[in-house]
Amino acid sequence: MAGFLKCLWRFRNFIVIILTPLLLLALPLVSPTPEAKCGFAIILMALYWCTECIPLAVTALLPVVLFPMMGIMEGTEVVLNLYLIVIDYYVLNFFKLLLFSLFFCRINKSASSRIFFALQHDFILIIFSSLVQVCIQYLKDSNMLFFGGLVVAIAVEHWNLHQRIALQVLLVVGVKPSLLMMGFMSTTAFLSMWISNTAATAMMLPISSAVLQQLSDTEANAEEREYRLTAAMAGQDNQTFELDDTKQTNNKELKPEDSSISMDKDQDGNFKGMKELTENGVTSNVCDMSPDSEQRRLKREQKYAKLLKGMSLSVCYSATIGGTATLTGCTPNVIMKGQLDELFPENGGIINFATWFGFAFPTVVLMLALSWLWIQFMFLGFNLKKSCGCGTNKDGDREAYRVIKDQYKKLGGMTFAEVCVLVIFTLVVLMWFTREPGFIPGWATVLFNKDKPYVTDGTVAILMSSLFFCIPSNLPRCFGKSKDGSPPEAPTPMLNWGVVNERMPWNIILLLGGGFALAHGSEKSGLSKWLGECLLPLQSVPPFAICILLCLLVAMFTECSSNTATTTLFLPIVASMATAIKIHPMYVMLPCTLAASLAFMLPVATPPNAIAFSYADLKVMDMAKTGFMLNLIGIIAINIAINTWGVAMFQLNTFPSWANVTKSH
């Protein structure tokens, strides 16, 4: 029996792939309605996403097959929503048939001319009928924003600017335990706003480990010096007593034969034992064998092992939390904007970079503060006076500070490329904030968007990210010569397509397209309307209670599924529910989006969790105990935010007129 179960487990992915659609096939067969057919596709994709029996991006392509075959959407509609370039497909086939016709020309010139004429005619019709629709919709604005933001992040990582920023912040914060944890959390959160959460975690964990190791070594040396000094002074007192006691009977100088510590002095007047410790920086074998020394060593190792666990968890959790602060910080944020624009196209651009940051950044600060207090309690205790370093030895602080400073010095001065990346990065952020700030007309409104919203955040992202491929990585030398006397070569650009192609998560763009296709298919089939009608009894439930329940549900679901898949599945459903019970769609969509990132309990929940779990030798229970409370802290912070400044920013206490109209084709 055990062997059979092991065999089933080894082939579980193939079993799920085959059995899941067969078991779900009863739904469209019993009720052959568009709603049931769309439900079949959504449930199938949800199970595939949760089990990851096939890659997530491949699952996102299933609407291309299922929706046309089930009569939910036309194939071209699905492709449009999945951002696939229809024109490229036709162009490719055009040139294939063109080559065929040229080859066939050798055999039958008249037939070849007829083929070419028909081909040319069809191609012209395709171009003129599809150009407007396809060229605008093959990549939505959300995808462009995501792509441009990732190119900026890749440039920051490629030129190591993120490490310079992190080390500089740590030099300012200091190395006291609590302050050090706060510094690592704030630095990691800030970096994860702009680069990937995984990259921020992978960069900060080695730095935190090196600093803690230096603190441990310095404390060990300080304890050993104190122990040796105490033992030396005690040995000196005993020797003096023995000399005075035997001076009358023996006029010979006595030396302590059994003393384990040499009391001889060198020319400088220092004890040789102390000098040996200073030179070697390690404890002697005799002292290591001492029970007191061994007990102190074990206690110190346990303390710093626990501190390393807390520091590692604080880094990975703050990376996840910080990613929710900006619109491009993590994928669910971009999905939420895309779904909102897809389901409610008349929303007037209510979500942009500035409005998202205005809502999410205070939420992130609140979550970070509460998370810091909880991790502090779990791994350092609530003795803030001790953990903040009041009254502690300054030598350890100086040594740990020197470690950070040495790592910063290894980076050298800022290069021309680093300066350019920093300038472009700053300009991108400023242009995002000032494009449409809300309380005053932005530069885009004044210059371009007087009649229609021509310029979006995606426009800014693509414009500024394109500069990395145009600006040289160092100052060009037009008139000088190289070291070997040959004319200087042209400098390479700051980024090339090989670097971007290697680091760009193309599968996420597929997931975004799959989410847009699901949302559009739900509308076309009437599934969204049916779900909304089923949820009408929720009108009697207070909105804040609905929001809390949905956040709890999403936070539990995202522990076992990717935050991208969770957001893609839940947002169309909660949007339909909101329109059915007449509450502001963003009142439930925004909290669910943030809750989808609250995956703190399991190592497999997010890549930062997995990195910290393996790096700090954590146990699952360590992460579960800490993460469970952090999930509750996140849900509380999100609901406080949505019911206070969220209501004031987006007028969430009223049902907007644009929510009555859904996009139809």
Image (tube, grey):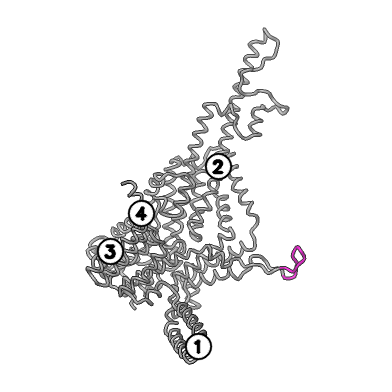
**Residue 107's disc number:** 1
Q: How far across and how far down the image is residue 628, in percent?
A: 37, 49
- The crowding category of the residue bearing disc 4, from other C-alpha atoms within 10 Å (few below 14, some 14 to 19, many at least 20), is some
> Which residue lies under the disc numbered 4?
636
Q: Are marks 1 and 3 in contact (CB under 8 Å)?
A: no
Mark 4 or mark 3, which is nearer the start of the sequence? 3
- Position of 588 with respect to 534 (left or right) is right
Of residues 98 and 333, which is closer to you in this image? 98
Q: Nearer the viewer, mark 2 or mark 3?
A: 3
Looking at the rendered structure, the kind of residue marked 2 is Gln
Is 236 situated above or below 459? above
Q: Quadrant of residue 479?
A: bottom right
Q: Are marks 4 and 2 in contact (CB under 8 Å)?
A: no
Residue at the location (27% across, 62% down)?
Answer: 23
> Which residue lies under the disc numbered 2?
213
Q: Nearer the viewer, mark 1 or mark 2?
A: 1
Quarter of the picture containing the C terminus is bottom left
Is 513 situated above or below 210? below
Q: Are marks 2 and 3 in contact (CB under 8 Å)?
A: no
Of residues 439 and 128, which is closer to you in this image? 128
**Majority secondary structure of the magenta segment?**
loop
> Which residue lies under the disc numbered 3?
24
Looking at the rendered structure, the kind of residue marked 4 is Ile
Magenta stretch bounds: 478-488
Q: Nearer the viewer, mark 1 or mark 3?
A: 1
